[in-house]
Image (cartoon, rainbow, N blue to C red):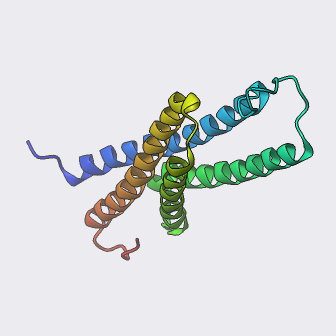
Amino acid sequence: MEKTPDKQLRKTLDNLRITGLALIFLGFWDILKFILYVTTGFGNTPDSSADSALSTGEWLIDLMIFFFMIVDIIFRLFIGLRAIREEKAKRHGKLHLVLAGGMFIFLCISMVYSFIFSTDSQYLDTYLASFLMDITTLWTLFELVHLTLRARKLQRQLSPGASPSL
């Protein structure tokens, strides 16, 4: 039994909403992971204790990382919410697709960089968990772009009088 374009569109839009939510939740997970990293002293050397005061340079680096994570979650919110609202959109913008593609490329570069410079075998399990989360995020970004383009194609098929927009 072949699905009608209307059923395919509803399923695609449902999957797109779920994918948008997944991208948002993965972003909040990254922030939670960073907060736990900072509060537990995970990044400190074994000689120093978690209770010792961090140097000004370490706090500055942590603050910069947190700032970039806030920018990341804003991008994820924008992309995820646009994906969730795709069904009701009168005009289909391309900005969230471009941002999703940019995030995909940046995350690939970041993963390669992390893989090359993660030499401390003491934290191998943490690196592996982060790698798996990054793979999940990559798949989510890919799926979000794919489902958005598929939904727009199905919408054009269902309304032939509408102007073609990506």
In the figure, residue 147 lies in which quadrant?
A: bottom left
The answer to whether residue 33 is above or below residue 109 is above
The answer to whether residue 64 is above or below residue 120 is below
Q: In this orientation, which residue lies closer to the viewer: 27 or 55?
A: 55
Residue 69, given in percent of the width and then of the height, sits at 69, 48
Q: Where, quadrant-wise, is the N terminus in this rendering?
A: top left
Residue 163, given in percent of the width and then of the height, sits at 38, 77
* Left or right: where 40 falls relative to 5: right
Q: Where, quadrant-wise, is the C terminus in this rendering?
A: bottom left
Name which residue lies at 55% across and 42% down.
119
Count of all numbered marks drawn on residues in the image:
0
Name which residue lies at 52% across and 40% down.
21
* Left or right: where 73 falls relative to 153: right
Residue 140, given in percent of the width and then of the height, sits at 43, 46
Q: Outermost residue toward the left? A: 1
In the figure, residue 17 lies in which quadrant?
A: top left
In the figure, residue 18 lies in which quadrant?
A: top left
Q: Outermost residue toward the bottom? A: 163
* Left or right: where 53 falls relative to 40: right
Q: In this orientation, which residue lies closer to the viewer: 92 or 111?
A: 111
Name which residue lies at 36% across and 75% down.
164
Q: Outermost residue toward the front? A: 47
Residue 112, given in percent of the width and then of the height, sits at 48, 54
Name which residue lies at 55% across and 63% down.
99
Q: In this orientation, which residue lies closer to the viewer: 32 or 126?
A: 126
